[in-house]
Amino acid sequence: MHDWKNEIRQALLQLSLQPLREAEIVEELGQHLEDRYEDLLLQGYAEDEAVQKTLSEFRQNEMIRDLRGLERTYLEPVELGQEPRSSQTAGLWQDLRYAFRVLLSQFGVSLIVIITMGLGIGVNTVIFSTVALLAFRPFDFPNQDRLVSVYERQRDTGLTRGSVAPGNFADWREQNQTFEDLIAIKSGYFDLAEASQPERLPGHFVSTGFFNTLGTRAALGRTFSAEDNQSQVVVLSDGLWRTRFGADPQIVGRTLKLNEDTYTVVGVMPKDFRYPVGDGQLWVPLVSDPSDRSRRDHILQVVGLPRSGVSLTQASEDLNRIAGRLQSEYPDTNRGREVRVAPLIEDATRGVRVAVPFMFISVLLVLLVACANVANILLVRAAARQKDIVIRLALGASRGRVMRQLFAHSLLLSGFGGCLGLFLAYWGIKALRTMPQDFSLFIPGWTRMGIDQTALGFTLAVSILTGILCGLIPALIGTRVELNQLLKNDGPSVVGKSSSRATRWLVISEVAFSVILLAGAGTMFRSFQQLLHADFGINATNVMTMQLSLSGEKYADAKSRYNFADALTGKVSALQGITDVGLASTVPLGYSYNRREVAGIGSTVFADDRRVSVIFRTITPRYLEAIGTPLRQGRAFTEQDRESTPRVALVNEAFARQFWPGRQVIGEQLSFNDGPKYEIVGLLANVINDDLDERADAEVYVPYAQEPVRDMFLVTRSDYTSDALVQAIRGEVSAVDPSVPVFKVKPMQQYVNERLSAKKMAAYSLAIGALIALLLAAVGIYSVVAYSVTQRTHEIGLRIALGASSGDILKLVVGTGLRLVLIGSAIGLAGALVLTQLLSGLLFGVSARDPITLAGIISILAAVALLACYLPARRAMKLDPLNALRYQ
Amino acid sequence: MKRGSAEMLILALVEDRPRHGYEIAKLIEQRSDGVLQFHVASLYPLLYRLEKRGLIQGHWVERPSQRRRRFYKLTNAGQDILKEHRDTWKAFFAALDRVAGINPA
């Protein structure tokens, strides 16, 4: 037969065609000539003649001329076995589609990987974002990094964060050489007599340089300037402006009645401006009386802006030099008084920072467990897919191409995991931000919480990198093998061996991390439980509190205040359902308390600079019953303790232990600075005033009749609580004096709950982290054991065929998993014993190495691990030996 | 021959179903009783040209126990051009008929 194609190929040489195109033309024309030749034969031509005729019809030159310019520029669909370079990106798209199909076909496994990654990324982003904000950038004013808190310090009394006396502040401010400005803040209450209902607002007196020093501006109007020093001006918070003044855009220039003085509104602050931390609603200039150089009353909070280039040490030395001079000038008041300078942020976030190391460790552990799990599952899958890889390689796929397919698979899984993580992070932070306001108000920065870009980037990078690495490592190992050997080999494969060692270690470390987390969470949880049942020295059930304030000229006289209190308690106790009613200057956990320095007790008189401050509370006789603080010894106050009778006082057990250890305190005399002597008539149980897990403070109570204060809490105990009862009580206040504002109406239980909520959050967030880790570890154990069952199907079948009972098989399979769990638990336990020490500062009533907790978590883990091993074991027990033996 | 007549012939032949090159050449020869002849040299440059213009589209078809062949089918654009050609030719013949009394039918 004639070689037509050769003729055509020769002719086409004159054109410069793409090889593919040329091959096509040769094929097409060759067939034409062949068809023509065969037709001619059928028509009766002899072979030679047919060839001659066919060739004569193939007029090359004519054809070549006509074909010029017809080299096709577009590409035909790619055929098998050929891969033009330009289709690399198209190939990647193809790989992604392929990966998506694989992902769907292994839906369960893919879902586990995605959820694992999502949880890891989500939890980490939430915690890292929260910590980054709360612990390191809690404020929204520009100078937060440069500002410092300035305190008075007295080494021999252990005072480290003392408020500053106005006299000292004035001297520091005038004489220092290192500060751009020093500002003072004094918090207080303001009676706003605007509408029918008088209202009492928390607010701050601040130096006129306050806003400029912080570097913040008003959202509306202006802040203070130096000229405002003596004027009656006020800046409002965004919250107050909205709730009380309906966000009136014309508010600037309006006048308000505050504490019976007239103030002009000059500005409104932005929404998130909340400094000093708390619920302050307005700021007015701290009008400093030049003659007020008191050095005895320590009432100011001081913040300074050091000049640029001045170090913390230089600033501290500068102020201490001044303080040193003051010490020798005013030995009565300033002996031992030094200055302590600390970065503002560090100082404001010290409460949060205690928890930072543990939070970081716990989220890192969750991330590690999540990554280990993803690695684990992907390694196991890769081992299972090894045959598949080898077949692809044998069919001529390039190593790069196969790796790219595996890469696409990991990329897709990581992508979905990342999306889920992002969603969870967003949702988690939103949930956190809507925590009860009473609690979050006191944590600077809480309301500005959002997803931190760096945190998100970091966790996304870590987990996606894990996904990709775990996708690629088996690919690297798998594609390097000798094809021939592998295709022949029926036994456990190369990837199988090396990756199963890796997966074992991954499971061991997962178990270890989970044990550590569970131990931490368990101890925190037990501590929280102890706290719930702890004795705070009060009984909050059915106790209602509200604040009252007797302001103005009307109550300038002590007698008028006493009369008001007497009339009010009389009227309220007559109300149906009320069992006890009392008044007190402060209540435990009420976020504010008064202190006084004890000058002497019995025959002991303390030197001026040795005086220790105690909590001081003024109460009416029935207050103790109303709040539920038990009397331990002696007597409580009665109606007979009057202005005219000898001064009496009650002290608590902490006081007795601190000042009069081992001796009978009742009957002793007690005195405060410059005050009269009080006779101690009774001993009370300790109450917790501030943080629930702190030790009780020393306290002194005096009768309201002898020291009637203007600001007080009305405390009522009733058979039930209802809004109607609260209304009735308010009605009685109005009946006694309609001008007295009632505010902060709150059940006592709510004060307790607010304090508990921080602990609750810590305990629950740890518990959630630990649960996630436990779940992930269970998934890890399951996937390894299940994989080993698949790998050993042949062997298990053989055992069954040789007479192994299902009990033997169960032992074999569960043993595989439990060995890993035991090793992991042992390592984890060792780690937990070290790490829970970190927690000891946060614990209440439970040891950091609480054996009950540790035993508990080990049994939980063992139960979960057993279940994770049992499921694949059951499958192994049900194997049909015949099928299993055939299984390769 | 009028310019574009060969083009019209090919388009018309692949109008009802896809055909390969040799089939096209053979049909032209048969239906014109050998008056019109297309050989390799004239047919394929024309097919490629039509394909490049998007009037026809070629694709390889494999059938069991046969060599694969390249079949050409008429595209939508080809359909339009074919109709245009037909109209032109009808008008041309009508004109010839009126002038010279030729009735092609």
Image (cartoon, helix red, strand yellow):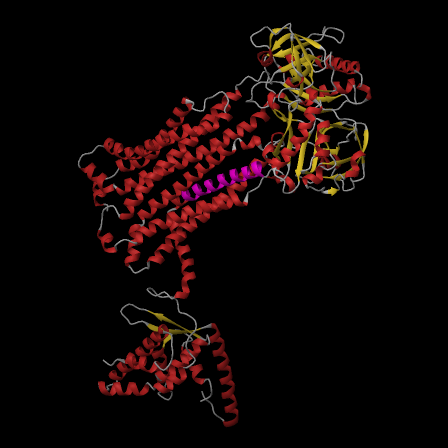
Q: Residue furthest left?
A: A802
Q: Is residue A780 visible?
A: yes
The image position of residue A618, as x and y in percent, is: 69, 15
The image position of residue A627, as x and y in percent, is: 63, 15
Relative to A497, does residue A523 appear above or below in the rendering?
A: above
Relative to A632, does residue A6 appear above or below in the rendering?
A: below
Q: Which residues are magenta?
A: A111-136
- Nearest the camera: A54 or A111? A111
Image-based side of A413 in relation to A543, left or right = left
Q: Is residue A232 visible?
A: no
- Nearest the camera: A861 or A51? A861
- Nearest the camera: A441 or A231? A231
Number of marks:
0
Image-based side of A303 in relation to A43, left or right = right
The image position of residue B96, as x and y in percent, is: 50, 91
The image position of residue B40, as x and y in percent, is: 35, 83
